[in-house]
Image (spheres, rainbow, N blue to C red):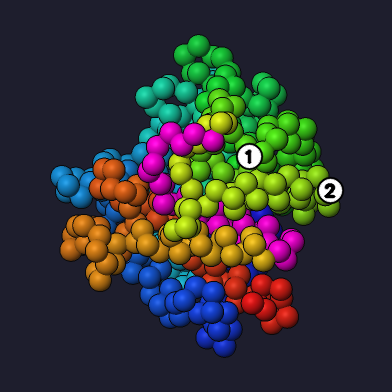
């Protein structure tokens, strides 16, 4: 299965105590401790990030000014964590909040819905007055996930299909990254999120059975592989810069394409990109947020939420290769993720603030002292994927031997 919200989307069973030995062996923490860290975030921290007034999740919380930013596009992926909580713990209020967040997005003019627009189904970056391909793929995935959990064609499957059509138009226009609403023009500059588009197309195919969507995913074949540089990396900002926020999805999408087609070229490309990450992973388990083609690091800061997202992709790659280095690299990334959580016993600043405690920093070191739900969704879901994946490994697996 190609879903991204929770381990149950991959047909993984929640880890049990009987199978928890491998978790302790590899992570240095017990299943009970990791579950506790997830639950503290879900049940204590996350509810405070939800605006009852708007029926949506705040943009972020600034610990210095004790101020919430109004809801915005954080609501595209933050609900994934809420659905993961529903899947794992049967927590109905979490699913309800995810539904509210999706409805707020639709009603607040972030999603283009006017039938005369050429960008129907596109999701808007308001300041730039552009509909972004990346956001639109995330919106499609959000609605497909809600459809899977509610069974409602309207509005969820209907909205996912609408965004799928926008993604199709972006592909038609030379794999455009955005559509300028006022000029009515497509652009290839910006963030090339082909990985998330492929994930959306394959999930649309899986959910609907319509071959059209599989065909669209496979149509990215030559284009996507052509973006990979000689060093194995994808420099997806204007063809010049690696960004950790854009790393997990192309890696995962290439593995998905291999699973769908059994063509080794996709797995080879995924391995090369993963190996590029292995060579550049810091001792702490992270990757810089921006690197240019010459290997220069543009900023020393880390986007902690990107680490577990890349880790999830490495788990899927490991599933298809059984190569230990991918599992160990993933675990290091998850360990970095855990270090970004503000626990009461940690040395993190503002840990006594209840709106900070059990959250995860947006940046490390502390660039702006903000916590946000679009970061937490990767951390918490990542831990769930890690626990359940490790518990699923057979005792004879190569990764469990050493």
1 or 2: tag closer to the N-terminus: 1
The image position of residue 1, as x and y in percent, is 69, 58
Q: Is residue 148 visible?
A: no
Mark 2 Cα-neighbour bin, 10 Å: few <14, some 14–19, many ≥20: few
13 lies left or right of 334: right
Q: Mark 1 points at which residue?
A: 233
53 lies left or right of 129: left
Q: Is residue 313 visible?
A: yes
- Which quadrant holds the C terminus? bottom right
Q: Mark 2 points at which residue?
A: 263
Q: Which residue is drawn at 49% across and 73% down?
A: 27
- Compared with 182, 17 (above or below) is below
The verdict on residue 320 being magenta is yes
The image position of residue 309, as x and y in percent, is 52, 53
Q: Identify the mark at residue 62; answer none if there is no mark.
A: none
- Highlighted magenta segment, given as a residue range: 295-323
> How many numbered circles are shown?
2
The verdict on residue 398 being magenta is no
The residue furthest left is 65
Q: Whole-Å distance between the Cαs marked 1 and 2?
A: 20 Å
Q: Residue at x 66, y 72 (%)?
A: 399
């Amino acid at each position: 299965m190609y879903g991204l919200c929770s381990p149950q989307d991959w047909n993984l069973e929640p880890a049990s105590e009987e199978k928890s030995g491998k978790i302790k062996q590899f992570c240095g923490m017990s299943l009970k401790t990791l579950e506790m860290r997830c639950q503290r975030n879900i049940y204590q921290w996350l509810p405070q990030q939800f605006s009852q007034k708007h029926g949506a999740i705040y943009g972020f919380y600034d610990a210095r000014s004790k101020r919430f930013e109004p809801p915005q596009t954080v609501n595209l992926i933050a609900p994934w964590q809420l659905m993961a909580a529903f899947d794992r713990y049967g927590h109905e209020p979490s699913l309800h909040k995810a539904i509210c967040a999706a409805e707020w997005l639709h009603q607040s003019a972030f999603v283009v819905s006017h039938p005369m627009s050429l960008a129907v189904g596109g999701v808007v970056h308001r300041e730039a007055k552009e509909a972004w391909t990346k956001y639109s793929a995330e919106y499609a995935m959000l609605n497909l996930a809600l459809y899977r959990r509610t069974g409602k064609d309207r509005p969820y499957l209907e909205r996912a299909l609408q965004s799928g059509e926008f993604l199709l138009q972006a592909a038609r226009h030379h794999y455009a990254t955005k559509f300028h609403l006022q000029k009515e023009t497509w652009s290839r500059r910006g963030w090339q999120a082909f990985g998330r588009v492929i994930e959306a197309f394959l999930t649309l195919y899986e959910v609907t059975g319509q071959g059209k969507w599989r065909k669209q995913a496979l149509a990215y074949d030559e284009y996507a592989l052509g973006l990979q540089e000689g060093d194995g990396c994808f420099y997806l900002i204007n063809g010049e810069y690696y960004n950790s926020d854009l790393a997990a999805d192309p890696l995962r999408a290439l593995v998905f394409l291999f699973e769908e087609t059994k063509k080794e070229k996709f797995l080879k490309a995924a391995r090369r990109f993963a190996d590029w990450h292995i060579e550049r992973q810091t001792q702490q388990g992270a990757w810089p947020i921006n690197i240019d083609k010459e290997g220069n690091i543009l900023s020393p800061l880390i986007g902690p939420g990107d680490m577990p997202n890349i880790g999830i992709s490495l788990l899927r790659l490991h599933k298809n290769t059984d190569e230990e280095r991918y599992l160990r690299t993933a675990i290091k990334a998850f360990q970095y993720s855990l270090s970004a959580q503000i626990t009461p016993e940690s040395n993190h600043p503002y840990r006594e603030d209840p709106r900070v405690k059990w959250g995860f920093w947006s940046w490390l070191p502390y660039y702006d002292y903000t916590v946000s739900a679009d970061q937490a969704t990767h951390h918490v879901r990542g831990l769930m994927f890690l626990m359940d994946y490790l518990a699923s490994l057979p005792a004879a697996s190569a990764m469990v031997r050493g």
